[in-house]
Amino acid sequence: MLNALIAAGIILCAIQAIRVKKLIAAALWLAGCSALTALMLYLLGAPEIAVIELSVGAGLVTVLFVFAINIIGDEAPVRMPAIPPLVAWLLVILSFGTLAYLNLPLLEIEVPTLVTIPMAASSIWEDRALDVILQIVLIFAGVLGIINLISDNSSRESKA
Amino acid sequence: MTTIPYIDMLTVMIVFGIGLYTLLITRNLIKVVIALQILVKAGMIALVLAGRINGQVMTGQSIALTVIVADTIVAVIALALAVQVKKHHGTVDLDKLRNLKG
């Protein structure tokens, strides 16, 4: 029951995030979507991932969105999209069908309820050390991105 | 006792569909990043779910963690790009940016 409510909340937040005209409201709906996703991950037995998703997805990314929208402004194009909505819907239905075709046989598998919640940390450090190195590189790339985001180019251009 | 996570599977499929639809029809650069975030959330739940179904819980979770980091960096860089595009071209409308020459 709780799972169904959280699922409905995620879907509602995702729909609102794409439906609302104001970008700042869309960013806040996305934060709600992230928070509910974290709750679902926790119920799936992944508390560490849930905490990281909550702090990064609902916290850091939302702050960055608000910061970027503050600089860019709440501009919303009103013209029709390049791809007709009917074609987009067809593609979505096609992908939905493919996912259903691949996933629905899994419904016959009986998934054991988790007795003890395993800790992902041991797997990360022992089996996936390469991923950790990749993540460090990505975090450095992100830092450069943030520096680019907050730097003021106009002063540099006026000096040149 | 067994739990069949069909609600989670259905959520993954619907959220993926919402993200894909937005990605296809939107013109605003910021909305594109939002659509990507929604798509990745579906992928993240799917990874944790797949790990649990296959009995490789920790592998699924560690890959989901990598996905969170990568997704955040993608969002940061995309937003930085959007800010720079707005400063240089005065718009974040993808259709107008596509028509730019030079």
Image (cartoon, coloured by chain):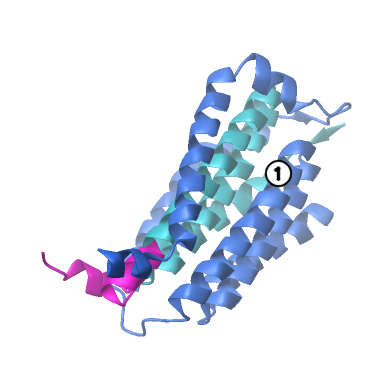
Our reading of the magenta stretch's main secondary structure is: helix
The residue identified by callout 1 is A52
Picture residue at 68% right of the left edge, 57% below the top? A59
Chain B as rendered: colour: cyan
Residue A13 lies left or right of residue A120; in this view the side is left
Q: Kindly tell me whether residue A86 is visible in this rendering.
A: no
Tell me if residue B93 is in the magenta stretch.
yes
Residue A33 lies left or right of residue B40; in this view the side is right
Above or below, A11 against A103 in this view is below
Residue most extreme to the top: A126
Q: Quadrant of residue A148?
A: bottom left
Residue most extreme to the left: B102
Give the residue type that dot 1 points to: Ile
Q: Quadrant of residue B63?
A: top right
User: SS class of the residue under badge 1?
Assistant: helix
Chain A as rendered: colour: blue
Q: Nearer the viewer, residue A49 or B60?
A: A49
- Give residue A84's position: percent from left, percent from top: 29, 72
Q: Kindly tell me whether residue A154 is visible in this rendering.
A: yes
Picture residue at 50% right of the left edge, 29% below the top? A134
Chain of residue at mark 1 = A
Picture residue at 26% right of the left edge, 73% below the top? B89
- Give residue A21's position: percent from left, percent from top: 50, 82
Q: Which of B16 and B87 is in front in this view?
A: B87
| On-image quarter of the N terminus of chain B | top right
- Give residue A76's position: percent from left, percent from top: 41, 81
Tell me the magenta residue range.
B82-102
Q: Which of B47 and B99 is in front in this view?
A: B99
Above or below, A122 against A71 in this view is above
Tell me if residue A137 is in the magenta stretch.
no
